[in-house]
């Protein structure tokens, strides 16, 4: 019904306009064409002056009204150290272009009024005026020179790369339709190499897993950064053109497929500090920025206020497709302590997703972080066993000691845990242990018994070769006689195939 009424109104307006035209045409015939034309010119000239006034007033009023939300004044000042220089350049540019805009609009409508068609007045043609051309060439050139030089100075400050050896946090953002894939370096502080040919479902960034720097890299779902620390952002794209845009920090850079880009910035305001600024009250206790005190959900007055849930954001500033809106990511700026706590909870993408799978090229390699983790785990269990009073708690499984199938040959990675055991024997010179081998029930019992004895003896020989006195070591095989799980499942049989040691003296 509303659409029908709107169509009827438009038809009626069209009819009225046509009728007014006919009346005007009839009046011109009665009063004469020249008189009507002069009255029309005068009327339109006056209308142009009225429009000029209303237009300029509306322009200035709307700019003042929306200055906080659209022009980023008020609480939306820059949250990065370099942002103030960019804001200053925009202010200067707006000042000069604003003056030119107002003057040109006034002259445009004034000339339309002053030089309207009038009886007895002829147009004056000025094909050339040197003085006028010098004025409107030199003045803009001088102003533009100052603006360009100032802009170049700000650009060089913002786009300057970090110096070799400078302390910086380097992260990476890869754009694709329709999201950002983020990557952080691990404890080594270095991002690993990439090769687009290695991109797959399990390896979305094409990381080269033979590069040790990739081992500790992790992929967070949001950007977490410490305040006051310089950050270098690597930017790439996997499909089409995107744009890595952090509006609150006044940085943006295109993400171009096949052409890595970057920018550097230093956050100066934490997320919580920015929230407090948005929610500040004036001297009368009233919200200084009322729009930020509105509820997040207009239909629920009890929902949090907008400033309470504010977050910085990463957006894509290119129209990269119909799902473009989905590329928003949360950016959190926190204290250094909070950042370190967050880092400690992040898991390596390689170790949590790739390690031990078909995509892992390092199955026979232990990385330094894994060696340390296994050593710490072994030492913790040993200390607990040494302090225990129950006899059952004195037996420990060598979880990472394994053998080749149906063989007493140790696998390559077993030596790390055996070295941990040798170090423990040296640390506790009075400790004596009994090494025991166990198998599942697959195969002949006699073969399993013999195999378990050979494996226990193999571990003993390794420790003796490491300098441990043989008198402190005994080796025994139990075959499949002491299962710790059901042999009816592969998981159970795998648990039963184990090597243990029991502390017999300490």
Image: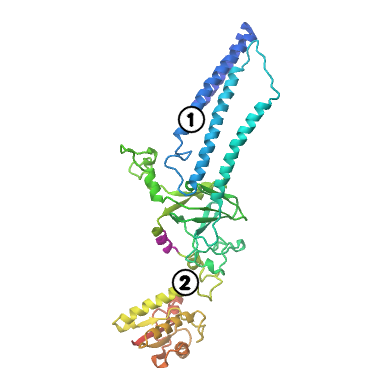
> Mark 2: which secondary structure?
helix
The disc, 1 or 2, on the residue closer to the chain's N-terminal end is 1
User: Looking at the picture, how far across and down is residue 183, in whole percent?
Assistant: 51, 59
Residue position marked by numbered label 2 in the rendering: 369
Q: Residue at x 63, y 15 (%)?
A: 117
Q: Main secondary structure of the magenta part?
A: helix
Left or right position of 13 against 302: right
Residue 441 appears left or right of 128: left
Q: Is residue 1 visible?
A: no
The residue at the far right in this view is 127
Residue drawn at (51%, 83%), measured in percent from left and top? Answer: 405
Q: Which mark is residue 60?
A: 1
Q: Is residue 459 above or below residue 159?
A: below
Which image quarter: residue 115?
top right
**Residue 341 part of the magenta segment:** yes
> Residues in magenta?
339-346
């Amino acid at each position: 019904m509303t659409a029908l009424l709107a169509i009827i109104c438009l038809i009626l307006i069209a009819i009225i306009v046509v009728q007014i035209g006919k009346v005007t045409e009839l009046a011109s015939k009665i009063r004469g064409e020249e008189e009507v034309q002069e009255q029309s010119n005068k009327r339109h000239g006056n209308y142009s002056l009225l429009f000029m006034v209303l237009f300029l007033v509306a322009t200035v009023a709307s700019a003042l009204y929306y200055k906080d939300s659209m022009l980023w004044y008020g609480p939306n000042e820059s949250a990065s150290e370099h942002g103030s220089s960019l804001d200053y350049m925009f202010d200067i540019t707006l000042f000069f272009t604003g003056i030119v805009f107002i003057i040109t609009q006034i002259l445009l409508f004034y000339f339309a009024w002053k030089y309207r068609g009038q009886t007895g007045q002829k147009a004056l043609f000025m094909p050339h005026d040197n003085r006028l051309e010098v004025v409107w060439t030199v003045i803009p050139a001088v102003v533009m020179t100052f603006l360009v030089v100032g802009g170049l100075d700000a650009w060089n400050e913002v786009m300057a790369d970090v110096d070799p050896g400078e302390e910086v946090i380097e992260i990476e953002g890869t754009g694709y339709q329709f999201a950002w894939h983020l990557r952080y370096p691990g404890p080594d502080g270095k991002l690993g190499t990439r090769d687009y040919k290695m991109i797959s479902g399990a390896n979305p960034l094409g990381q080269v897993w033979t590069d040790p720097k990739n081992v500790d890299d992790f992929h967070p779902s949001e950007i977490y950064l410490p305040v006051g620390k310089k950050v270098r952002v690597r930017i790439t794209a996997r499909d089409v053109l995107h744009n890595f845009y952090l509006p609150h920090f006044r940085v943006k850079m295109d993400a171009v497929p096949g052409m890595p880009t970057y920018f550097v910035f230093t956050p100066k305001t934490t997320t919580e500090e920015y929230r407090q600024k948005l929610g500040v009250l004036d001297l009368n206790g009233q919200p200084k920025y009322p729009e930020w005190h509105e509820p997040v959900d207009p239909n629920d007055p009890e929902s949090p206020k907008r400033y309470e849930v504010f977050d910085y954001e990463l957006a894509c500033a290119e129209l990269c497709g119909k799902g473009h809106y989905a590329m928003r990511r949360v950016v959190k700026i926190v204290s250094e302590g909070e950042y370190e706590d967050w880092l400690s909870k992040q898991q390596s993408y390689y170790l949590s997703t790739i390690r031990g799978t078909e995509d892992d090229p390092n199955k026979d390699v232990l990385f330094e972080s894994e060696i340390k983790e296994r050593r710490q785990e072994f030492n913790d269990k040993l200390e607990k066993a040494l302090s225990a009073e129950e006899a059952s708690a004195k037996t420990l499984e060598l979880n990472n000691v394994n053998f080749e199938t149906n063989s007493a040959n140790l696998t390559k990675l077993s030596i790390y845990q055996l070295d941990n055991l040798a170090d423990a024997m040296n640390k506790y010179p009075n400790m004596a242990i009994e090494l025991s081998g166990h198998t599942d029930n697959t195969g002949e019992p006699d073969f399993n018994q013999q195999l378990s004895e050979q494996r226990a003896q193999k571990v003993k020989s390794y420790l003796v070769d490491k300098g441990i006195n043989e008198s402190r070591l005994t080796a025994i095989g139990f075959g499949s006689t002491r299962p710790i799980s059901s042999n009816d499942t592969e998981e159970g049989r795998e648990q039963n195939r184990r090597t243990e040691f029991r502390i017999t003296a300490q």
